[in-house]
Amino acid sequence: MIDARLFHILVDSFSKILIPGLTMTIPLTAISFTLALLIAVATALVQFANVPFFKQAARFYIWVIRGIPLLVQLYVVFYGLPRLGIVITPFPAAVIVFSINEGAYAAEIIRAALEAVPSGQLEAGYCVGMSYLQTMRRIVLPQALRTAFPSLSNSLIAMVKDTSLAANITVTEMFMVTQRIVARTYEPLALYIEIGLIYLMFSTVLTKLQRAGERRLSLQNRPKSGVAGTAKVSGRPMVPAFLQRVPMRKTLCPMENVPEQPCCQDK
């Protein structure tokens, strides 16, 4: 049974732990993950476009970041860079490290999703007059991001928990606040279980949002009527939505401009 003193400590510490979670842990995660997505999309597109120099640079970046522990990266940026005259305060240092670290992992997720899109989608964009950038933005990337959504959501949940490492560079997030309470009350078991439950609560909310997002994406991909995912009006298939927004102009498809072969004639 929990005695009165321990119960009072848990009740009193709950708000003291939760408030830094809402004001520090969540903003740190949101900012870092947003920047990580920008880095990941750029890195994945460079690899997908197969630009020689930039592709090798992207692979080197992914290789280095995935091979070095996150805690070591935090120490290098916060404790190591001041030796070079570069001093970064705790919160920006954590944002930089989490963004660069997560960007490397998310880049591989997005790259795999891009390669999963059939190559015919790219050719279809060229046939209706789109440039390479338009085809990527309007056709390929939306499909790839739908495929990558579950994996990216898992990465976001993992980042919420990884922010506890920021306590090592004096970021006053939930875990650091809990450590201070433990040092004052000498109740490590109960308090660390309590913060674990708070992390579980955050992860549960994100999991619910992930499932809601997946259901919405599945509804968007579901055909409304007709055959093979195209709606019909007056018995004629409609043009897909992403092609309706593109001004049509005369452009040669890969199969156009092929000379007709003469038919075989009986001699």
Image (spheres, rainbow, N blue to C red):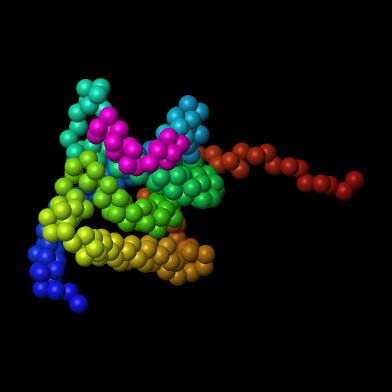
Residue depicted at 21% across the width and 65% down the height: 190
Given residues 266 and 238, the one toward you in this image is 238
Q: Is residue 33 left or right of residue 178?
A: right
When the figure is inspected, residue 204 is found, relative to residue 21, above or below; the finding is below
In the orientation shown, which residue stands out farthest toward the bottom? Answer: 1
**Main secondary structure found in the magenta portion:** helix
Location of residue 64 by image quarter: top left
Q: Is residue 193 visible?
A: yes
Percent x, y for residue 4? 10, 73
Q: Is residue 121 visible?
A: no
| Highlighted magenta segment, given as a residue range | 63-80
Q: Quadrant of the N terminus?
A: bottom left
Q: Quadrant of the C terminus?
A: top right
Residue depicted at 27% across the width and 47% down the height: 165
Residue depicted at 10% across the width and 69% down the height: 5
Percent x, y for residue 240? 44, 57
The reply to whether the magenta stretch includes residue 78 is yes
Residue depicted at 49% across the width and 41% down the height: 126
Percent x, y for residue 153? 35, 56
